[in-house]
Amino acid sequence: MMKKRRVSAVSAEERRVSTMKSLEAFGENLYDQMIDGTFPWVRIPSRSTANIHYDEKNRQYILGEKSVRRSSRNIRHIRPLTRLVWTARFAHGLCDVKKTSTLRDVFYSAQAYDVNFKDQAESDNIITDLESVLKYAREDFNVFPEERSAVFGDLTVEYTVPGYEGKRLNLTTHPDGIMIGPALTSADLIETSAQRIIVIEKGAMFTRLVEEGAFKEFNAILVHTAGQPPRATRCFVKRLNEELDLPVFIFCDADPWGMAIAVTIICGSANAAHIRGLTAPEAVWMGVYSTDIEKYGLPSEGLSEVDIKRLRDMLKDPRYQDEPWTDQINEFLKRRRKCELEAFSRYGLDYVVKKYLPDKFGEFSV
Amino acid sequence: MTDNGSGVPLEYIPSAFGQILFGSKYTLRQVRGTFGLGGKMAILYGQITTHSSAHIMSSTGTEKINEFVISIDIQRNRPIILKRKVHSNKRKWHGTVIEFAFDGNYTRAMSNILEYLMQTAIACPYANIVFVDPRGRLYRFDRTTRKMPVPPKETLPHPYGVDVETIQRIVNATDCSDMFCFLTRHFHRVGKNTAENFCRYAGLKTGRDPKSLTPDEIVGLVRAMKSFKGFLPPSASCLSPIGVELLELGVRKELNPEFVAVEQRTPSAYSGFPFIIEIGIAYGGGVPDKPGVSLYRFANRIPLLFDESSDVAWKVVNNMINWRYYNVTPDMPIALIVHICSTRIPYKTVGKEFIADRPEVEAELLSGAREVARRLSRFLSRKISFEHEKRRIAIFAKFLPKIARFSTELAGEEKIPDINRLLEGLSKYDEKEES
């Protein structure tokens, strides 16, 4: 067993308190305006494409200076503003009683207050507005998407959710992994022996690596994203990266969509340009590369029209402008082949653990 | 049929009800009929369909009520008096009662009859109209006022408006023995100077005896009258328009609209006949909800029901006015009420169902229609902006309190800020206007 390390980080409780303070300040601002006899209004950073810039230094999309004024004096603004204030009030209530909610819940909860959202999209949009105004992610307001991703590895966490306060759990406890849900997201990270994080796109490969003992072999915490990672998962990966100070390796399908997953974890997405703290800029895309298909003789199939169009778009995307991205995109376009993580099974169930991963870690000289 | 009108003087009763084309006129007056045909044709129609006579009772409010039973001698165009009776009239009743039978298809005529009565009630809101139909149903159109328009006055014909036949008739009847007297006594707005100027223009000596005029000279005289520029225009003081107030009452009473505007045009004249156009517009309420503008036409207070699309008013409403310009959309319930009163209504045909498009009449109709349309337009745009405003305020009134409540809770404050002042500041219209 490796030496366990104690982790020091901002505790979940501190984050909860500061989120609530921020929500209260938001309410006070509106309250004071009304006491002064003016129509309450708020300034929201603009999320229009014109205001989304790529920040080379931080390697992520960020919002520019532009903002919009949403005022209750304006007939077209008063409804969205009411919904925004209600959402803030609702989020504050969630934080206060340490309960969580989903985007869908929010949509329905609003109806009880007669501030109906037109549709789910509007409800989601208002939550994004609130994120932009307060610079907190919705997970901080205890609003979570549907869960699908999981984590496995030698990491001990301490829960802060009601009923489990102080309770500790080692993430090797369950061989299927522990779901990255609200409870885990708000847990404090206590200690670990791991030396790296492996983020895996597919559930089958995640299970393979658990069964083949890869977590021991490579001293790794395994994270399963289940496709494009939810923001809670990205946030969790970032915490593992920063709070545990461990390198992150991303392992996904050899196709444009796998690359997109990797780049989202590293650089974030334009959709989340208003939020910081979701990206792990130091994370490494370890594969599977286009060139690996030939190198390891992996079973592959041809790229579809959609794949090719996506690759061409990626060439213009600022997030893919350096290596290994540009090279690999061009390789894909040249070879016109793609393959899935499961393709390694062609050479036996342990091939990936015995051959591919050691090769790769060697390449990145870990 | 019973009315409480002025009654028919005894000496006229047989001819008035039993002689077609009775009533030669040397003077002009705004009257309902033109040729003295309508009433007698009805009695005649009764006579030929049921072989029955007409019962007439009338009094002008004297001591006596005269009763006649009359039929018409068709070949000689003369009344046949079958029975005559005189009743005493202690209560000084005045009016006329006519009773006769005729054969008709009531099922087919019903809607027209009721429409006629309803429209009559529009033009005469001071009249109580009671109708018991052949099926025994009672219809009532009650008056909403006791005010009546000033009755029309008789007037002399204007020289522009006479024909050879009229001149001949006047010549035959006149007591005058020179043209000066003839012109000044028998024609409208011809004074001493005008008569002298005209005689010089027409090449007639002022001392000429009118009875000595040859037929050719009479034709020449009529031509000269039409071309002479020195006549004063006919005066409309003899006319009896319904009046803005009464017409509005009539429209309100029968159509019960949300909005009415009525305009009376200043008098004008065509071919020597003075006329006045009155025009009203009604919107909403009981106004028939049919596509386009519903047209109600009146001539000397008589509703014109048929051949609407041949009428100059139809042309004005449908071809000459751009209703969109007045905020009017085709789906709105809008009625235009058009009344023309004149000493001679310019009917296009003897059927007397529609008004000819005389340029003078058309111009007055168009200006009048535009004026009332403008007033409707103001009402509509106000109504639209008012409703828009009401909806707008309602949205603020619904959401502002919520913002206040949620932010008070968020801020952890006790007292919810008073937002009524904010809401009051929003209103463009004050409370008074709202009600």
Image (cartoon, coloured by chain):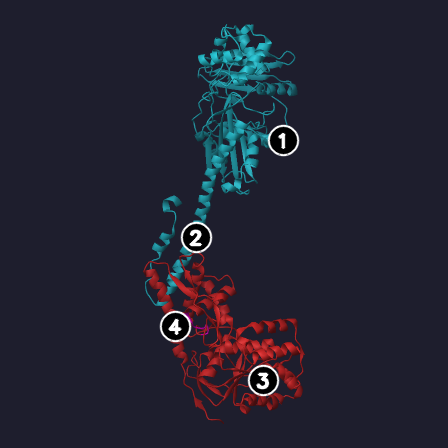
**Dot 3 lies on which element?**
helix
Type of amino acid at the residue the image marks with label 2 = Arg
Residue holding disc 1 = B108
Q: Residues within 10 Å of mark 1 (few under 14, many from 20)?
A: few
Judge whether B88 appears above or below A32 on screen. Answer: above
Distance between mark 3 and mark 4 Cα atoms: 38 Å
Drawing shade for chain A: red
Residue contact at pointers 1 and 2, CB within 8 angstroms: no
Distance between mark 1 and mark 2 Cα atoms: 51 Å
Distance between mark 2 and mark 4 Cα atoms: 34 Å
Residue contact at pointers 4 and 1, CB within 8 angstroms: no
Residue holding disc 2 = B392
Drawing shade for chain B: cyan
Query: Based on the displayed image, in which of its 4 quarters is residue B79 positioned?
Result: top right
Disc 2 chain ID:
B
Residue holding disc 3 = A207
Q: Residues within 10 Å of mark 2 (few under 14, many from 20)?
A: some
